[in-house]
Image (cartoon, rainbow, N blue to C red):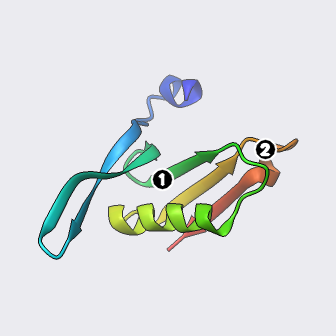
Amino acid sequence: MHELTQKNIKWPAQTPLPVNHKGLHIECGYRVDLLIENSLIVKLKSVESLQRIHEAQILTYMKMANIKTGLLINFNVKVLKAGTKRFVF
C-alpha cells in the first residue's frame, strides 16, 4: 500500500460495495479489501491454501462492481507469486 501511495495510485481499503436485488438496496452489502483506481479488485487472504469459496468471493465482487480484473493474494506462502491468482472477465 505504501508503494501505491508513493506512485499516486488511488487504493481505498475496505471499500463498501452496495447490493441491489429486486428493488432492495443495501448500501454496504460487501467490503472490497482493495480497489485500485476503480479498475482492479484485490482480495487479501492469509490461509493455508486458497479454496473455491475464496475464488467465488472475488468473482462476486468483480461482477457486482462491474470490474473486469481481480487479484486473489494469499500471504501464507513462501513465495508470494505462488499465492497469487488473477481473474479476468
Left or right placement of residue 59 versus residue 38 in this view: right
Residue at the far right: name it: 78
In this picture, is 54 found above or below 42? below
Residue 61 — which label? none
Image label count: 2
Residue 39 in picture, x, y percent from top left: 42, 54
The residue identified by callout 1 is 41
**Screen quadrant of the N terminus:** top right
Residue 8 in picture, x, y percent from top left: 44, 29
Query: What's under tag 2, amino acid-wise?
Result: Leu
Residue in the image at 44% along x and 67% along y: 60
Mark before the other along the chain sequence, 2 or 1:
1
Residue 51 in picture, x, y percent from top left: 69, 63
Query: What's under tag 1, amino acid-wise?
Result: Ile
Q: In which quarter of the view is residue 24 placed?
A: bottom left
Residue 20 in picture, x, y percent from top left: 21, 66
Left or right placement of residue 72 versus residue 42 in this view: right
- Tell me the element at label 1: strand
The residue identified by callout 2 is 80
Residue in the image at 34% along x and 61% along y: 65
Residue in the image at 53% along x and 31% along y: 4
In this picture, is 53 found above or below 37? below
Front position in the image: 77 or 6: 77
- Tell me the element at label 2: helix
Q: Are marks 2 and 1 in contact (CB under 8 Å)?
A: no
In this picture, is 70 found above or below 6? below
Q: Residues within 10 Å of mark 1 (few under 14, many from 20)?
A: many
Q: In which quarter of the view is residue 49 placed?
A: bottom right
Residue at the far left: name it: 23
Q: CA distance from mark 2 to mark 1?
A: 17 Å
Q: Residues within 10 Å of mark 2 (few under 14, many from 20)?
A: few
